[in-house]
Amino acid sequence: MDDTRTYEYKPIDQLVFSDDFMFGAVMSDSKICKSVLELLLQVKIDHVEYPELQKSMNPFYSQKGVRLDVYVADSDRVFDVECQSYKAESIGKRARYYQSMLDIGSLARGASYSELKESYVIFICLSDPFEKNLPIYTFERKCRESAEVELGDATHHVMFNAAAYENETDPEIKAFLAFVKNNKAESDLTREIATMVQTKKFEQSFINEYLAWTLHDQDVERRGRKEGRESGLRDGRKEGRNEGKVEAARNALAMGLSQAQVSQITGLSVEYIAKL
């Protein structure tokens, strides 16, 4: 996404639930995923459809896709669940972009807007995204002039702040946030998650996927750095050529050549040369 960061890839035996790949792998278990969603949102979910690990969604109108941590759905709702292990910049705009991807994914071509599913974009953050020391931040659209008027777009953006778990009054949510922050399982759900985390570390398929994932992302980072260096060199060479032309123009003017002649020699416009 828009945030630029260098990943620190852990050895498999050091992975915890809040690590990006492990989070996706554990939440791909429909039973755990359903339990986590029901706990955090305090809603009843009839079932979970096809939890997809790091689902990629590329809109037809843009080359910029998005890789969702966990994208799931039940009968009439869709959920994007992200575990934010680092301090994210522009988290509100990230949520907005993820929301747009959910909408594109849930509305068939030619369908009515009324068929859009109710949607939840959920961030589970290890650090406070808004620095107000609240364990939960919930955002829904209401009219500024009258709080009684709701937009009715059926969207919900919910940010959970594991750093403020001690301020949460619900004991089960508090235990979950504490587990995310400190990796200490003290509830039935977190113990179940902790067990799966350890189990995953010994699954050969998980090991292979994790290694392939890290190699792929490292390759992307390397290509990005290389392209950045090459772009910098190109810009530097271009800037150097321009500076050389300007210096040559100044010398030519000092020798008494006309602006038109200097323009013909250097390729600089007469207007630009006049400013020299």
Image: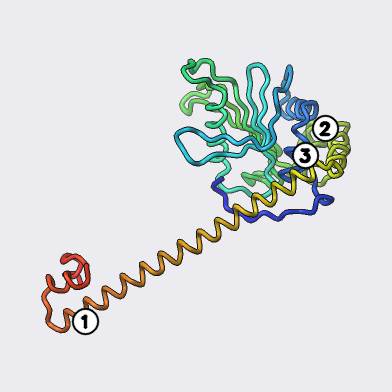
- Where does residue 237 sit, x and y in percent of width and height? 39, 69
Badge 3: how crowded within 10 Å, few (<14), some, or many (20+)? many
Label 1 to label 3, Cα distance in Å? 69 Å
- Where does residue 251 sit, x and y in percent of width and height? 21, 81
Badge 1: how crowded within 10 Å, few (<14), some, or many (20+)? few
Name the residue rendered at 62%, 44% in the picture: 130
**Mark 2 or 3, closer to the camera:** 3
Residue annotated with mark 3: 177
Q: Earlier in the sequence, mark 1 or mark 3?
A: 3
Label 2 to label 3, Cα distance in Å? 10 Å
Residue in front for this viewpoint, 243 or 81: 243
Residue in front for this viewpoint, 151 or 82: 82
Label 1 to label 2, Cα distance in Å? 78 Å
Instruction: Residue type at mark 3: give it.
Output: Leu
Name the residue rendered at 15%, 84% in the picture: 255
Query: Is 181 left, or right, of 195 in this rendering?
Result: left
Q: Which mark is residue 251?
A: 1
